[in-house]
Image (cartoon, grey):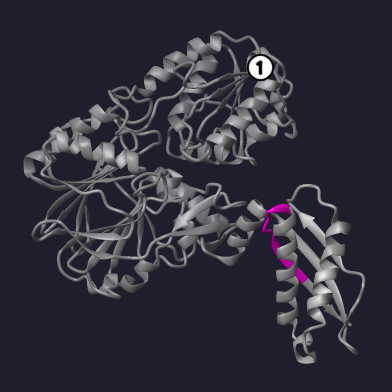
Amino acid sequence: MHKNLNLNDINEGLHFLSLGGIGEIGANCYLYGCDGRWIMIDLGLSFADEKFPGVDLLVPKIDNIDSIEDKLEAIIISHGHEDHAGAVAFFANKIKCPVYATKFAMLLIENRLKEFSKVEGFSLIEINLNKRLSLKNFTLDFIPTTHSIPEPSAIVISTSYGSLLHTADWKIDQTPTLGSEFSKDKFEQIGNNGLLALIGDSTNANVPGKSQSENDVKEELVSIFSRFSNRIVVTCFSSNIARMKNIIHAAKKNKRKVALVGRSMKKNIEIAKKCGYFNDDDVFINEDEASYIPRENLVIICTGSQGEKRSALYRIAYNSHQHLHLESEDVVIFSSRDIPGNEKSINNLKNLLVRQRVEVVTADDDLVHVSGHGYAEEIKQMYSWTKPYISIPVHGEPMHLEAHKQLSNSSQVPFTKILENGKCLQIAPGEPKIVEKFETGKLIVEGKNLYDSDSSFIKERRKYSFEGLALISLIINDNDNTINKNIKITFKGLPEIDENEITNDFKLIFIESFIKLNNSQKSSDKIVSDLIKNNLKKIMKNSFQKKPEIEVHLIRS
């Protein structure tokens, strides 16, 4: 490896570098380099966990592309899910190359760009899945697949060194609600022509067997709805247009009207209509109308399947929605999977519903959800068709990547490499090898702004959340450097503490140490503030075994 090497220095060979998406679920961002020219596939976001208090979303750091600004040919979006396309708008000012996406994904991105007022000057180009895309050192062909969003595709990347297959997210569904059935022919053709490397989805590599079809959910929902005589609420991902069509189908079969609730849900439906995925007779009633419909005649489709605190279901469950509320013996169907890291918030929401005597139905109870990702047998089937020389598992946590590696090994793939984000793999010429480790990481989303995940404010939040906060105000008289007796100490995020007792203890040891300072030291805010912190820390540690963050408000008058 070379010290201080940047992407601009990698000018020969075929390379692969992940900036996000390996060892994690979400934040997918993959770079391919061929003789000094580059393309990026996907630029997604991920959900933040408890390590980032008060933060909902993270995006990958992509500073590495700064050195190849004039050599980055294109960003290709494999499909419209947020973990593959959701970060584009956040980097609109940094992206200088065209972004290619199918119509549904393109309209999703365009909507987000409008929110950021970044549409003007941004090059967003629609992909025709039936046409080849030719770039300087790459030729791209798109293979429609099946997944839990419209218009997903695998991408064949042809180079002078050989062909690569980036599967993106996929499953084998022979009876999808939207789009054509999964076709193996083009994948078999890839294998017959010779495939250098497969870069593949690992999400369900550790799940044995084969996934079920979306059409199975369609038929099951009709039966499930018929069991209930009160209000039915179904929460699912707002991008799962096929699922919403199936919910509408089940509602019609059971003579129920459908209300859409949730901003992202409504926006995505409008996009789906523009793409022709809804008929004119798929009419939704508004939230105000829904409040007057008899319980037995209503189905509500809403956001909130991940327990998000600003979601429609959360507001309905906490009785803070303007028009809708739940009553005893209503039913809420979670027609989705739990994204890793969201289990606690989802369970909290389910427990609240149960306490209100609302029936909760999940995929553990009935067939209300099928995964959009292929299971182990499907992944093995893909290897039997494509016969790659190299396998690079992506899109998964370590346990998923390892399970994927075992599947590729059992499929007699000669070389399988589990990478880490930032490790640049030279695929060709010669045997595959790591040539460099680049710095990667995450940026915090706060509103429409991005901040480094190591920013001091997030460290402070983390400290406050674990240890609490002590605020101390102290006045020093400028004339003679004497201390005003009105010292005020306030605690936040700590058990009930006798603040007067702590204040008296602090006064004794602080004044004793303060009078030992010379006049120059007493005039230094930093020296005095450090002395205040050290003395208060001693008291807190000795009395409570706690180390709260201490904020000093020092006033000189």
Q: Could one spot residue 303 in this view of the protein?
A: no
Q: Which residue is mark 1?
A: 330
Q: Amino acid at mark 1?
A: Asp
Of residue 416 and residue 383, the one placed in the foreground of this image is: 416
Against 402, is 510 above or below?
below
Q: Where is residue 273 drawn, in percent x and y? A: 48, 36
The residue that appears at 53% across and 47% down in the rendered structure is 49
Direction from residue 256 to residue 37 in the image, left or right:
left
Q: In the image, which residues are magenta?
A: 544-552
| Whether residue 138 is situated above or below residue 319 in the rendered picture | below
Q: Tell me the crowding category of disc 1: few under 14, some 14 to 19, or many 20 or more residues within 10 angstroms, Cα based.
A: many
Quadrant of residue 30 within the rendered picture: bottom left
Across and down, in percent, residue 549 comes to: 68, 62
Provide residue 15's location: percent of width, then percent of height: 21, 60
Asked if 48 appears above or below 12 in the picture, the reply is: above
Is 227 situated left or right of 69 in this image?
right
Quadrant where the N terminus is found in the figure:
bottom left
Out of 387 and 255, give the one closest to the viewer.
387
Viewer-proximal residue among 289 and 12: 12
Identify the residue shown where x is 49% and y is 16%: 365
Q: Is residue 142 visible?
A: yes
x and y percentages locating residue 199 in the rendered image: 24, 46
Q: Residue at x 84, y 73 (%)?
A: 474
Seen in the image, is 557 located left or right of residue 367? right
Q: Residue 481 versus residue 179: which sits nearer the camera? A: 481
Answer left or right for 148 relative to 544.
left
